[in-house]
Amino acid sequence: MNLFIFAQILGGFGAISTMLSSWQKSRDKIFTFLLFDNIFYILQYIILNAYAGALTNIVSLFRTILFKNKGKNKFLSSNYPLVIIIFLYIILNIFTYNSLFSLFPSVASIVYAIVLWQDEPKKIRMGSSFMLFMWFIYNLVVRAYVGAFTELSLFISSVIAIIKIDLKKNDTRSIN
């Protein structure tokens, strides 16, 4: 099998993992799917020799592991893990900056880190939507059209999940 095609397949598995994370009702299950998302994208970017993407996803994998275990000890219950991850994303952006649009991945990742730190799945889904939209714009600018299509699809899926899970729940409460 051609390595380029294999990389695209890995990216597809990453996209599916992200989409499935949006539909989970518990924080723990959201993070489990996000672990797979990070792993698939790390492998994809390594195969494509896109080391900035791989490095960003390695930080994201580290972030997901830390955040999944939030509350299990004093350090993981503090805000230090969040501060460390935001700092790592900023440092990465210093080395990868080349235009205004090159800031989008870092901004998206920082916002996403902040919402993932939350305990409420609704906030995670909303932050995911923002992050996916930022990546969609970035992919259009750099002409990564398959990536843009994937991000747009995931964005739509996240918005539908917000409507079906979060807004529908609010409508049910207001009726009672």
Image (cartoon, grey):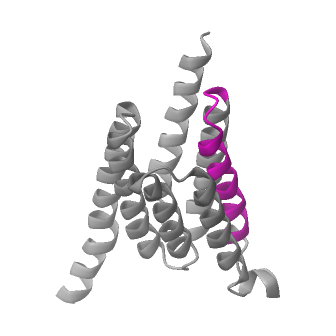
* Quadrant including the N terminus: top right
Count all numbered tags in the image, as a single digit: 0
Q: Residue furthest top?
A: 1
> Is-magenta flag for residue 45?
no
Q: Depth check: give the residue in front, 173 or 60.
A: 60
Residue sticking out furthest to the left: 175
Identified at 72% across, 68% down, the residue is 66
Above-or-below relation of 108 to 36: below
Q: Is residue 89 above or below residue 86?
A: above
Toward the viewer: 131 or 77? Answer: 131
* Image quadrant where one finds the C terminus: bottom left
Q: Nearer the viewer, residue 74 or 53?
A: 53
Residue depicted at x 61% and y 33%: 44
Q: Position of residue 50 (x, y in %)?
A: 61, 35
**On screen, residue 72 above or below 22:** below
Q: Is residue 167 left or right of residue 125?
A: left
Counting from the top left corner in percent of width and height, residue 57 is at 63, 50
Q: Is residue 11 left or right of residue 156?
A: right
Quarter of the figure with residue 170: bottom left
Residue at the spot 34% in from the left edge and 55% down from the top edge: 133
Which one is nearer the viewer's eye here, 108 or 18? Answer: 108
Q: Specify whether 132 is left or right of 78.
A: left
Quadrant hosting residue 72: bottom right
Q: Residue at x 62, y 39 (%)?
A: 40
Give percent across and percent down for residue 99.
Answer: 43, 52
Left or right, 149 with reference to 41: left
Main SS class of the magenta portion in the image = helix
Q: Tell which residue pokes out farthest to the front in this image.
A: 98
Was residue 49 drawn as part of the magenta stretch in this picture? yes
* Residue range (magenta): 47-67
